[in-house]
Image: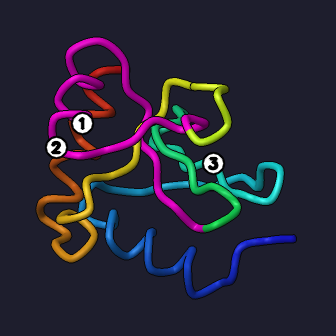
Amino acid sequence: MSLPDDTIAFVLELLEPIGALSTRNMMGGLCIYSEGQIFAILDSDGTLFLKAKGGFADRLQAAGSRQFGSDHGKRMGYWTLPEAALDDADVACDWARQALADL
């Protein structure tokens, strides 16, 4: 199963202000790259996760994000984009820039 084109288009449009992005399919989801570095993924449900560790992960958690895999007990270093950012490209891109800066 693959992600619908409109879901991918929405996320790429949301993150467009941060610059050129590339993508690669990943087990029903999508990896999102900036300048060759993965910084975000879409899971098979179309949920956007940002790569995060340490203080950045703590800030995401404080903003209400949940960790990838937390529903299945297999946590990974990716956290959901805070819900409020899904309606505001400026806020979404601010979080994405923080993810890139934290790589």
Q: Which residues are magenta?
A: 46-70
Q: Which residue lies under the disc numbered 1?
A: 60
Residue 59, position in %: x, y? 17, 30
- Between the C-alphas of marks 3 and 1, the distance is 19 Å
Instruction: Verify CB contact (< 8 Å) between mark 2 and mark 1.
Output: yes
Residue 76 sits in quarter: top right
Q: Which residue lies under the disc numbered 2?
A: 63
First along the sequence among labels 3 and 1? 3
The answer to whether residue 55 is above or below residue 38 is above
Left of 18 or right of it: where is 3?
right
Q: Residue at x 33, y 56 (%)?
A: 19
Tag 1 secondary structure: helix
Tag 2 secondary structure: loop
Amino acid, disc 3: Cys
Left of 58 or right of it: where is 4?
right
Q: Residue at x 23, y 59 (%)?
A: 92
The one nearer the camera, 59 or 94, is 59
Tag 3 secondary structure: strand
- Marking on residue 31: 3
* Residue 66 magenta-highlighted: yes
Residue 11, position in %: x, y? 44, 70
Amino acid, disc 2: Ala
